[in-house]
């Protein structure tokens, strides 16, 4: 918990490209070195990923009556250059860019633009936090459908994200760039949007304009669904809200900030020490809170695994390597750059020998909930191995094995290279209802017993994998 607290409360958000990220990375490196981890070092992953930091901001409605708007700016948007005041207009279907241009050309100068549909009302009858039920776990264990061919999941069809990452990313995460560019050309002052997270949660994931070459939006704020609802109701009554705001933010390019943090406990067996068991979590976060559950909890757990292994005095036969990735939120930037450096280029059939030396990769990036098992990523060969290794922890209910894969995080990169890569099944708790990419991603939502169990079990698991006579079975 102290590790997660240091990451969250002391070092705060670790947005890709920022000085804050690098400062926290140096803390992680020094911390692991102090434990006696044999080698700890940085590897760069991006030369054109920009940093962006907020110094000050405020958003208010000043007419027809005063209202403090619950807001947080999206990342990588431009500064407002002082306090700005303008009338508000509403554009619902902003993805249809040609229709937007036809309707709004010449009408947006000096305006704040409210975008999107009104969130459906939520009376909060459903719980905000839940653990997996026994029925849900049993269902996942019995489901033998293979994992999607794409790390983006079934919704992306048969597109391979790793091989076609830039194409998928541009069409998905950055699909509204033309709209943002149009607003900028028309002289709009700012954008207000929302995500339907109740009560009052602000969700500014980002504009994903993180590369130096990307067009940066006018000041763009995520606002609470309740603030959005009131503004839209005023528009419906033909009462025009007047918005006052400012955003003092800084964009900068420091390629040296973009590092993965790698640490190793060198194997003790003269022959097997060249083989590696890897654990990992992404170190970067979004910016509106402290990144406690995404992914300070995963990072803290995996760092604690390394501390436990050193503190026990055990000498694993194989090398155990931790990787804390940067740029995961922007499309696995850190892990993919590492893989291309060490395993071979995406889209090419040739692979480096290092691929054959990785026995397994275990990833943690599903919040701060308790480990309930492992997603096997379609690899049935590892089931009996994990069953035996996790049997001593039956009383903790952490041994559930699902053939399915959970997507959207760094283990997908390892699976692309046919390395046994696995994501930990965790209780969701309030991850997707409260904390994920929101202004509430804080220590208050990290349950101490859960993360202690996670670190303890994974430490035992990793040690056993490192001690096996053979490497972990590869997927057929």
Image (spheres, helix red, strand yellow):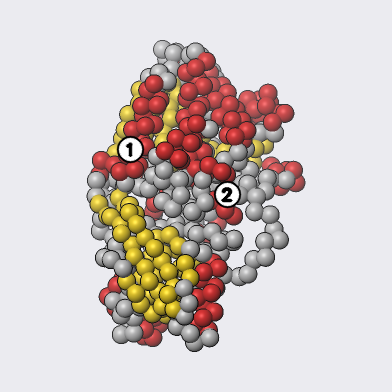
Give the quadrant of the C terminus: top right
Q: Quadrant of residue 42?
A: top left
Q: Residues within 10 Å of mark 2 (few under 14, many from 20)?
A: many
Of the two numbered discs 2 and 1 on the same chain, state the one appearing first in sequence.
1
Q: In the image, which disc is placed on residue 23?
A: 1
Query: What percent of the width, then of the height, locates residue 82?
Result: 28, 66
Q: As displayed, is residue 240 above or below residue 70?
A: below
| Residue at mark 2 | 431
Q: Nearer the viewer, residue 267 or 452?
A: 452
Q: In the image, which disc is placed on residue 150?
A: none
Q: Nearer the viewer, residue 111 or 283?
A: 111
- Distance between the alpha carbons at the discs numbered 2 and 1: 26 Å
SS type, badge 1: helix
Image point (63%, 46%), residue name? 429
Outermost residue to the right: 135
Residue 372 visible, this angle: yes
Image point (42%, 75%), residue name? 62
Task: Report whether 9 appears left or right of 184.
Answer: right
Outermost residue to the front: 66
Q: Nearer the viewer, mark 2 or mark 1?
A: 1
Query: What percent of the width, then of the height, locates residue 75?
Result: 37, 57
Q: Quadrant of residue 175?
A: bottom left
Q: Residues within 10 Å of mark 1 (few under 14, many from 20)?
A: few
SS type, badge 2: helix
Residue 345 visible, this angle: no
Image point (42%, 50%), residue name? 286
Q: As displayed, is residue 411 above or below residue 408?
A: above
Q: Nearer the viewer, residue 228 or 244?
A: 244
Image point (63%, 25%), residue name? 389
The answer to whether marks 2 and 1 mark residues whose Cβ atoms lie closer than 8 Å is no
Query: What percent of the width, then of the height, locates residue 364?
Result: 52, 38
Q: As displayed, is residue 318 above or below residue 148?
A: above
């Amino acid at each position: 918990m102290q590790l997660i607290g240091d990451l969250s409360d002391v070092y705060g958000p670790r947005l890709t490209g920022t000085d804050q990220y690098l400062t926290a990375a140096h803390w992680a490196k020094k911390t692991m070195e102090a434990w006696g981890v044999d080698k700890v070092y940085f590897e760069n992953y991006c030369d054109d990923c920009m940093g962006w930091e907020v110094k000050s901001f405020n958003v208010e409605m000043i007419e027809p009556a005063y209202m403090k708007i619950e807001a947080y700016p999206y990342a990588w948007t431009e500064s407002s250059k002082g306090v700005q005041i303008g009338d508000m207009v509403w554009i619902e279907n902003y993805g249809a860019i040609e229709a937007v241009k036809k309707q709004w050309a010449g009408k947006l100068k000096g305006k704040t633009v409210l975008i999107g549909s009104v969130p459906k009302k939520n009376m909060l009858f459903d719980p905000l936090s839940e653990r997996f039920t026994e029925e849900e776990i049993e269902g996942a264990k019995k489901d033998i459908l293979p994992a999607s061919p794409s790390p983006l999941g079934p919704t992306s069809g048969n597109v391979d994200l790793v091989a076609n990452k830039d194409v998928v990313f541009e069409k998905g995460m950055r699909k509204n760039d033309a709209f943002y560019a149009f607003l900028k050309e028309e002289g709009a002052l700012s954008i207000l949007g929302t995500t339907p997270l109740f009560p009052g949660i602000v969700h500014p994931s980002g504009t994903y304009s993180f590369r130096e070459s990307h067009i940066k939006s006018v000041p763009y704020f995520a606002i609470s669904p309740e603030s959005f609802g009131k503004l839209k109701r005023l528009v419906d009554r033909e009462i025009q809200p007047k918005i006052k705001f400012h955003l003092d933010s800084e964009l900068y390019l420091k390629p040296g900030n973009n590092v993965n943090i790698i640490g190793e406990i060198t194997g003790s067996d003269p022959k097997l020490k060249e083989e590696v068991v890897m654990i990992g979590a992404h170190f970067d976060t979004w910016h509106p809170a402290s990144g406690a559950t995404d992914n300070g909890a995963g990072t803290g757990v995996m760092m604690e695994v390394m501390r436990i292994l050193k503190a026990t005095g055990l000498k694993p036969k194989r090398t155990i390597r931790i990787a804390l990735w940067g740029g995961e939120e922007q499309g696995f930037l850190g892990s993919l750059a590492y893989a291309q450096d060490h395993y071979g280029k995406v889209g090419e059939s040739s692979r480096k020998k290092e691929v054959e030396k990785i026995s397994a990769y275990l990833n943690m990036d599903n919040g701060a909930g308790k480990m309930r098992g492992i997603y096997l990523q379609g690899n049935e060969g590892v089931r009996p191995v994990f069953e035996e290794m996790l049997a001593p922890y039956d009383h903790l209910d952490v041994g559930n094995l699902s053939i399915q894969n959970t997507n959207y995080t760094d283990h997908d990169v390892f699976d692309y290279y046919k390395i046994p890569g696995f994501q930990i099944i965790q209780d969701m708790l309030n991850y997707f209802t409260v904390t994920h990419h929101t202004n509430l991603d804080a220590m208050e939502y990290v349950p101490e017993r859960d993360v202690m169990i996670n670190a303890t079990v994974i430490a035992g698991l990793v040690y056993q994998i490192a001690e096996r006579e053979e490497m972990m079975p590869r997927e057929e």
